[in-house]
Image (cartoon, rainbow, N blue to C red):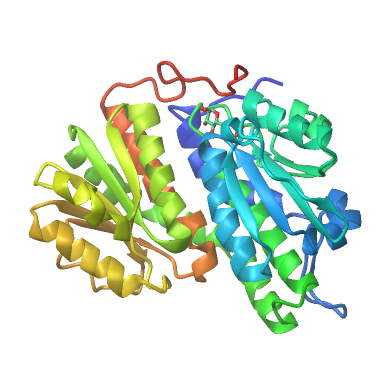
Amino acid sequence: AQIQKGAYKHFMLKEILEQPEALRNTMRGRIRLGGASPPEIRFGGLEPLMERLASARRLVFCACGTSWHAALVGEYLIEQLAGVNVEVEYASEFRYRNPILARTDGCEDIVVVISQSGETADTLAAAQFARKKGILAIGICNVVGSSIARETDAGIYLHAGPEIGVASTKAFTAQITCLAMLALKLGRYRGAISEEQFEEHVTALLSLPAKMAEIFAQSDKIYEMSRVYRYAHNFLYLGRGYNFPVALEGALKLKEISYIHAEGYAAAEMKHGPIALIDRFMPVVVIAPTSDATYEKLRSNIQEVLARGGSVIAITESDNDDLDAECEYVIKIPKVADFLSPILAVVPLQLLSYHIADMRGCNVDQPRNLAKSVTVE
Ligand code: G6P
């Protein structure tokens, strides 16, 4: 059946607002909590492979674009929560550089390809390359029956529903949700997290859709902010830890659909270059949740920007008033454990880029020069 925009002006807006529902669908049937038996996360296709995944020497994540950003969040998640070594590669670089891949039993490398469409040529080729070398390849895709889904040994579907807008939104948050579930499952399997911690984390995961819906209540503020910044020529996005990839993703969204040059940076790296660019024409978006272990350092980064006349848009939790007085705009997201903050923090950034692109008269759903799935290498 043809997918309709319905009352929405663009598919992208529809898909942004659909995210709470998409996350529910991603988690549906996979999480067991409450009742007589211990809490559990299950992925049909991966169950027989858990021992291999949990004892792998490395998981090598290969992806492109927004899926690559989700993979970066996945690296933090799986290393922190499960203690399994993860490496993230652009699919296009991975297979051209003769990667060192181990095949020894109990000490193997496993390739995990992540792709919304399941058709991106470089990502598909990375999976084929791995399998040709006898390496287990796992796919995390949204599109059921896609090439990657067919050509990997096993996988996880996002179940986020069709994504039509070229700029990926709900697939990104669904990818991170899947990776968080995988991290928790692996962490529990390996004993890296206790049953109590597991239960607490799973409860937090299940609370995400409702928390995300709360962000939409600030739509007016995000719209107003977009109006103020719509003519900017450059944007800088800063984040640390789990939210460094969110800074990259925020910048990518803005570039893709509004054609404004934007860079995402690890906040502490600002002093090694981008700080030279800061003046009153440079809006800086800082993702600064207090749950971040380096929150105080992020605050000093904000001070450094302000001292140079830059204007700061901060993303932080609803109970934090620290930044209200100093920043131009503060968008508040509900409080959540640090490892889940990317899923909420990216939402205002998606909306900011959406509104700016729309106000600039850009073709939001089909930006120039871009394709939904890139089937050339
Ligand atoms: C294209 C799309 C992006 C997407 C990337 C990877 O560049 O415009 O939105 O993130 O491909 O796509 P995939 O389907 O593999 O996730």
Side of 55 relative to 174 (left or right): right
Side of 201 relative to 37 (left or right): left
Side of 351 relative to 143 (left or right): left
- Residue nearer the viewer, 291 or 220: 291
Q: Percent position (x, y) of residue 283? A: 20, 46
- Residue nearer the viewer, 152 or 332: 152
Residue at 63%, 27% in the rendered image: 122
Task: Specify the quarter for ligand 1.
Answer: top right
Please tell me how many numbered marks the rendered image carries. 0
Task: Report whether residue 181 is seen.
Answer: yes
In the figure, 8 relative to 186: above or below? above
Residue at 46%, 24% in the rendered image: 365
Side of 124 relative to 297 (left or right): right
- Residue nearer the viewer, 302 or 40: 302
- Residue nearer the viewer, 237 or 204: 237
Task: Report whether residue 118 is seen.
Answer: no
Q: Quadrant of the C terminus?
A: top right
In the figure, 181 relative to 68: above or below? below
Residue at 64%, 56% in the rendered image: 86
Q: Percent position (x, y) of residue 229? A: 20, 40
